[in-house]
């Protein structure tokens, strides 16, 4: 748990490389230890999803990877049951579409 807190500090890092590395580390931890980190995901998502507004490609790519791990799951499964393949990609596409709509709504209201 402390490790996740330290890595979350890097999400608001000074450089895009630090931010993307932190998000990729969170995704990897979530992939390897899904049951242990599942309770922390609701606290991880908001700051990570805010990085989707970044103009840096490296950061956005890391966030999309984090979303994919959350949707498709790690070793213990996920929304798609860890099956992967076309079904998993369909889930990821659907989640990204919903995120796009949420971001558009947030931009309209600000």
Image (spheres, grey):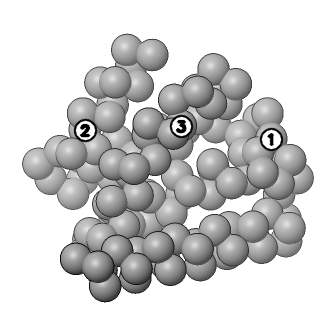
> For this rendering, which residue is in front, 65 or 92?
92
Q: Residue at x 47, y 73 (%)?
A: 102
Between disc 1 and disc 3, the foreground one is: 3
Q: Is residue 83 above or below residue 99?
A: above
Within 10 Å of the Cα at label 2, are there few (<14), some (14-19), or many (20+) other Cα atoms?
some
* Distance in Å between CA atoms under marks 3 and 2: 16 Å
* Distance in Å between CA atoms under marks 1 and 3: 15 Å
Q: Residue 76 lies in what quarter of the image? A: top right
- In the picture of the structure, the residue carrying the numbered disc 1 is 77
Q: Which residue is drawn at 40% across and 82% down?
A: 104
Q: Where is residue 41 in the image (x, y as percent from the top left)?
A: 53, 37
- In the picture of the structure, the residue carrying the numbered disc 3 is 41
Precedes in sequence: disc 1 or disc 3? 3
Relative placement, left or right, of 79 versus 40 is: right
Q: Give the position of the N terminus as an image quadrant.
A: top left
Q: In this view, does 9 lie above or below 15?
A: above
- Seen as rendered, the residue at the extreme top is 2
Q: Where is residue 84 in the image (x, y as percent from the top left)?
A: 83, 57
Within 10 Å of the Cα at label 1, are there few (<14), some (14-19), or many (20+) other Cα atoms?
some
Instruction: Check contact, mark 1 vs mark 3: CB within 8 A.
Output: no
């Amino acid at each position: 748990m402390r490790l996740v807190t330290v890595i979350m500090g890097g999400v608001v890092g000074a450089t895009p490389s630090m931010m993307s590395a932190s998000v990729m580390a969170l995704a990897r931890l979530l992939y390897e230890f899904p049951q242990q980190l599942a309770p922390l995901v609701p606290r991880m998502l908001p700051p990570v999803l805010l990085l989707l507004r970044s103009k840096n490609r490296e950061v956005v790519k890391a966030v999309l990877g984090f979303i994919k791990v959350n949707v498709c799951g790690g070793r213990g499964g996920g929304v798609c049951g860890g099956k992967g393949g076309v079904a998993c990609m369909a889930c990821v596409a659907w989640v990204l579409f919903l995120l796009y709509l949420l971001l558009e709504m947030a931009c309209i209201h600000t």
